[in-house]
Amino acid sequence: MRVLLLSAYEAVSHRYWADSLMANLPEVAWQTLSLPPRHFAWRIRGNPLSWWLKEHETLNQPYDVVLATSMVDLATLIGLFPHLGRARKIVYFHENQFAYPESSDQMPQVEAKMVNLYAALAADTVVFNTAYNRDSFFAGVRAFLKKMPENLPAAKPLEALCSRAHVLPVPLTPIAEANANGSIPQRIVWNHRWEYDKNPDDFFNVLIALSEQGVDFELAVLGQRFRQTPPIFDIAQEKLAAHIVAWGPQPEQEYRELLATAGIVVSTTWHEFQGLAIMEAAQQGALPLVPDRLCFPELYTDSYRYDGTSEGLYQRLHAWLTTPETRPSVLNTEAWAWSAWREAYRSLLAPDMAGVASDK
């Protein structure tokens, strides 16, 4: 079976998914096309043109399946290469533009939303990494369509689209080897993008307050850094200097080693659709502490969630750091592993593949 895998804005989590998908389904003949994760406005509207200009030969080949991320303008691509319409078309949503806030600093969001929606409409199957992602997409589409002129009827078409929707998470790749040194209970890790939507202000302000109260902890601030970062990072680097064991992006090996020694991994984010960074740290043995919103309630029990406020985060962190018996047990992440989802992905690509080469 020949599968064309398209990623129009290959962020770290998108690349992780694509690489692990190809590694775990080696019986598939994969062909991939991707574009770097920069110039968002150009990428989300221009990806068919980019590939039309650079990858004409590849796109003219026959494929059994076209598997595209939701930022691929699949409808336009099929218009440029009509034979792709004869393949099974699957769109995978790592995120959806309907769940992001409106911002005057970004491109008009109607453009990005329309690409998401047209891609879903052009697909035979749409897949979301969490139920939250699916539900926020359809809620957003309903609200969006109500703004259209003439108040066009949308209920039945949306029901049909809903019937083609599935939830399949990005599975975790198995850990190569166990951590010999074990977790350091007082070591807190931040391993998210250094951007406003990850709400670093709440995280760092809570840690500064804990530090001023004399609470003992270590801090490793990892994740993807950009040329412009929220000011709180500079403030925190100065005020928390005595606690810091790592600051900034790390080479892959060092990153994995720091995750393996983490005692706690925290999220304060305003936007998350699955949260691979938290999952990876939890897989290594860190206790996840996540807000009670977005995708987290479907993934984590109450023991690993706080109420979403900075006060709630302070109270939970203070307890975990000063009273070890309040900590929950290490989270079992086997349900997130590739071994639990391989057959579902085989069935996604081709129902008659399920059970084939199951030991690979």
Image: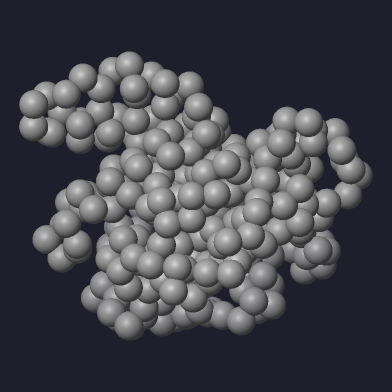
Residue 212 to residue 202: above or below: below
Residue 282 to residue 248: above or below: above
Nearer to us in this view, 331 or 66? 66
Position of 67 with respect to 36 (left or right) is right
Q: Quadrant of residue 309?
A: top left
Residue 101: x and y, percent?
A: 22, 49
The single residue placed furthest to the top in the displayed view is 156
Residue 282: x and y, percent?
A: 62, 52
Position of 307 with respect to 258 (left or right) is left
Colouring method of the image: one colour
- Residue 330: tell me if it is visible: no
Total residue callouts:
0
- Residue at horizontal 34 percent and vertical 22 percent from the top: 157
Position of 314 with respect to 297 (left or right) is left
- Residue at horizontal 63 percent and vertical 60 percent from the top: 61
Residue 280: x and y, percent?
A: 62, 56
Q: Quadrant of residue 335?
A: top right
- Residue 349: tell me if it is visible: yes
Nearer to us in this view, 185 or 296? 296
Residue 51 to residue 164: above or below: below
- Residue at horizontal 52 percent and vertical 44 percent from the top: 85
Residue 93: x and y, percent?
A: 47, 45
Nearer to us in this view, 30 or 54? 54
Position of 214 with respect to 264 (left or right) is left
Nearer to us in this view, 289 or 325? 289
- Residue at horizontal 43 percent and vertical 24 percent from the top: 162
